[in-house]
Amino acid sequence: MKLNYSIKKFEHVIVAVDVVIFTVRDDSLQVLLLELNEHPFVGKWAVPGGLVKTEESLEQAVGRHLANKIGVSDVFVEQLYTFGDIGRDPRGRVISVAYYALVREKDIKVTINPRYSDIKWVKVGKLPEMAYDHAEIIKTAWERLQAKISYTNVVYSLLPQKFTLTQLQRVYEIILGKVLDKRNFRKKILSLGVIEELDETTRGEPTRPARLYKFRSQNLQVIEIL
Amino acid sequence: MKLNYSIKKFEHVIVAVDVVIFTVRDDSLQVLLLELNEHPFVGKWAVPGGLVKTEESLEQAVGRHLANKIGVSDVFVEQLYTFGDIGRDPRGRVISVAYYALVREKDIKVTINPRYSDIKWVKVGKLPEMAYDHAEIIKTAWERLQAKISYTNVVYSLLPQKFTLTQLQRVYEIILGKVLDKRNFRKKILSLGVIEELDETTRGEPTRPARLYKFRSQNLQVIEIL
DNA sequence: CCAAAAGTGTTAGGTATACACCCATGG
DNA sequence: CCATGGGTGTATACCTAACACTTTTGG
């Protein structure tokens, strides 16, 4: 059965990248979504992405699309999975190499682009109607993120340079979707030696000042955490 | 700088699949390799693979190439990673979605194809000169396999239906590259309930008969193993 | 002095590790 | 009877999980 969209069909296999951009915001895990305004997905939402050019690597393509939409490219990015089902894009045969990125909300500038109706942060648990197989891509990315924070230090890319243990714990809780025991969490995280105590505390809060910490390394390290 | 190979350059991004096929053979972990006889890789070795057609999914492409070279397609197969560096194929821009497969050597029939000079099993630790980035692909696959046997039951796909605990332990040792304690291994694997004791033993060996076991499930199950 | 978050130890149960000898078979 | 691999238990160290009260600050 053929549909009569007024869009061109690609005759080749085409390669795209899609990037699930996560941030922790308003006490929840959120992803950046774009609202499409082109047939056949008017009003549906998608994660940022686009075609890969012949003369750029996959990572360069991801960097380019990230820079377009959020104005930065030095964030944590990792390849997730490649989605290649035949019917996933009605315009033709598009194979998408999906990536996910972790950003600090305040580091980035969300840029609107006339090709889309809207752009916004959405809670991963409450996605709107998604285009393509992007709901599945986000689900896969979320699962990967949950697994990854349990044996690496990736969360450094979601936190400010200096943070309290409570903030750190909260990020774990938000991503894992469950509460953790404060004393056990602290014992564990400190025993791993991935973070370092600073000679500084929070100030000005109507509550007891909290000690600040920083990650020893801002690169991905593999270590059993939780 | 241009090289004067007499091969055609692709003007588009092309998508291929490559499959690292593992088996346990001669008390070692081996991969199936093909010897190339075309410029610029004459005499170099590569894992099976080939282009993805517009009308087939990635998994279908993998199945097709598997069937071509080893005459079966109902084996354990999992997507590994997508390799897309610009210079990885001198003929043009080829992005390869790499998979790995686990097979029982005796289940398969290795088929020679005139497009290659030779095809053979090679120990993963002693690879010959590899074409493209296939050495890297194999290394990535091996690491994934090591990780995967530690939290799933995948090894079912490398063992016969009925096996002894010593055979099972040996497969773990070969893949992990280290010896395991017999009593601890048995305690652990039995406590997980992934395998089931049979009312049968080995016979005819010049040694005490060994109890046979089978996997309860021949599908991938996630469970902490080692 | 009140509200709010920070900070801090101990116990019990379970899991991982290290380790050595006897058994059953075929030749 | 010998060679070969099969089969079995215990003690210790370590890790995980459960759990509640005191401290410090700003308002």
Image (cartoon, coloured by chain):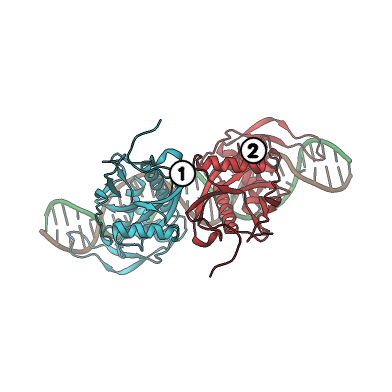
Chain colours: A red, B cyan, C brown, D green
Could you say where residue A3 lies in the image, as x and y percent from the top left? 57, 67
Label 1 sits on residue: B84
- Residue A29 picture location, percent across and down: 67, 50
The answer to whether mark 1 and mark 2 are in CB contact below 8 A is no
Q: Chain of mark 2?
A: A
Q: Which quadrant, please, contains the N terminus of chain B?
A: top left
Residue at x-position 26% and y-position 49%: B116
Q: Are marks 1 and 2 on the same chain?
A: no
Q: Could one spot residue A19 in this view of the protein?
A: no
Q: Amino acid at mark 1?
A: Gly
Q: How many marks?
A: 2
Task: Point out the residue furthest to the top here.
Answer: A199
- Spot occupied by residue B87 in the image (x, y as percentages of width and height): 42, 38
- The secondary element bearing badge 1 is classed as loop
Residue B169 visible to an observer of this rendering: yes
Asked whether A103 or A155 is in front, the reply is: A103
The image position of residue D20, as x and y in percent, is 71, 51
Q: Which mark is residue B167?
A: none
On the rendered structure, is A83 left or right of B182?
right
Three-letter amino acid code of the residue under disc 2: Val
- Left or right: where C16 falls relative to B75: right
Is D1 situated left or right of B159 in this image? left
Secondary structure under badge 2?
loop
Mark 2 lies on residue: A72
Give whichever of B57, B103 is nearer the camera: B57
